[in-house]
Amino acid sequence: METTNMFMLFFLVLPVFLFNFHYAIKMNGQIAIAIFRMILQLSLIGLVLQWLFDMNTPWINVVYVVLMMTIASYSMLKTTKLSIKTFGFHIWLAVFIPHFFILLFFNYFIVDLTDIFDAQYLIPIGGMLLGNSLSGNILAINTFYKQIKDGEKTYYYNLSLSASRSEALKPYFVHALKSSISPTIASIETIGLVSLPGMMTGQILGGSIPITAIKYQIAIMIAIFTTRYLTAVLAIYLTRSRAFDDYDRLKPHVIGNS
C-alpha cells in the first residue's frame, strides 16, 4: 500500500463529518483529534519498531516488551481505579507472568524459532497477547470488587456461618472469571463464520496460503484465551491479598485514585 493511497481513506470519513455538521453533532473536532493522534502515535511506533527490528538485540527487545506490559498494567490500574500504591506491583506481576512465559512458549514451540527473542516475532505477538487480554482483565477486576461491594451483606453473612475468606469470595471470583472470558469464548465460537481475524487476514494479504494463516490464527487464539484467563485469575488472587483487613473486611479505599 502506497503512502499516497492512504489519503484516500479520508474520503471514507468525509460523510461522517458532513452528517455531524448537518445535524449539529459537535463531534468533528474530537474525531479529527482522535484520527490525528492515531496517525501520529502509529507513525512514531513505526519508527521505533523499524529501529528495533534493525537492531534486533535480545535484551532491548525484552525491555521493550516489559515496557509494553508496564503500560498495560498502568492502564488496568487507571481504568479499574485500583490504588496504584497498593496494587501496582501485584497487577504488574499478574500481567507479566502469563504474558511473558506464554510469549516465549509460543515463539519456541509454535513458531519454532531459533532465537525466541527475535524482534520480528517477540514484539508483534506480545502486543497481540496484551491487546486482546487487557479488556477482559479490567472486566474481571471491576466485576469482582463491584460484586463484593454491592453484595457485602451476603459476603458477611457467609463469613458469619464460619466460611473462610476464600469460601465466601468464591461465588464472586467465579462470576468475575466467567465475565472476563465469555467474550473470548464467543469470539472463538464464531471465528471464521462472522469475521476473519486480524492475524489471519494480515498473513493472507502478505502472501501466505490460507491454510498456513489458519494454523497461526488457531495458535494465537488459544494463546490469547489462555493468557486472558491466567492474567484474570492472577490479578484477582494477587490483589485480594491486599484488599482485605485482618477481619476479612474489604478495605474502604481499595478502589480509588491514590
Image: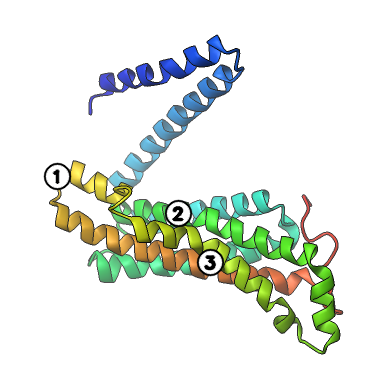
Q: Residue at x 74, y 80 (%)?
A: 168
First-in-chain label (3 vs 1): 1
Residues packed near mark 2 inside 10 Å, few (<14), some (14 to 19) or many (20 plus): some
Question: Does the residue at mark 2 contact the one at mark 3 (Cβ under 8 Å)?
Answer: no
The amino acid on which the numbered mark 3 sits, given as a three-letter code, is Thr
How far apart are the alpha carbons under marks 2 and 1? 25 Å
Left or right: where 105 falls relative to 25: left
Q: At numbered mark 3, what does the secondary structure look like: helix, strand or loop?
A: helix
Residues packed near mark 3 inside 10 Å, few (<14), some (14 to 19) or many (20 plus): many
Q: Residue at x 56, y 60 (%)?
A: 137
Q: Is residue 58 visible?
A: no
Q: Residue at x 55, y 67 (%)?
A: 178
Label 2 sits on residue:
132
Label 1 sits on residue:
207
How far apart are the alpha carbons under marks 3 and 1? 34 Å
Query: Quadrant of the rendered structure where residue 15 is?
Result: top left
Label 3 sits on residue:
231
How far apart are the alpha carbons under marks 2 and 3? 12 Å
Residue at the farthest top position = 22
Residues packed near mark 1 inside 10 Å, few (<14), some (14 to 19) or many (20 plus): few
The structure's colour scheme is rainbow
Residue 97: x %, y % from top left: 50, 69
Front residue (pair 184, 86): 184
Front residue (pair 199, 193): 193
Residue 41: x %, y % from top left: 46, 33
Query: Quadrant of the rendered structure where residue 26 is?
Result: top right
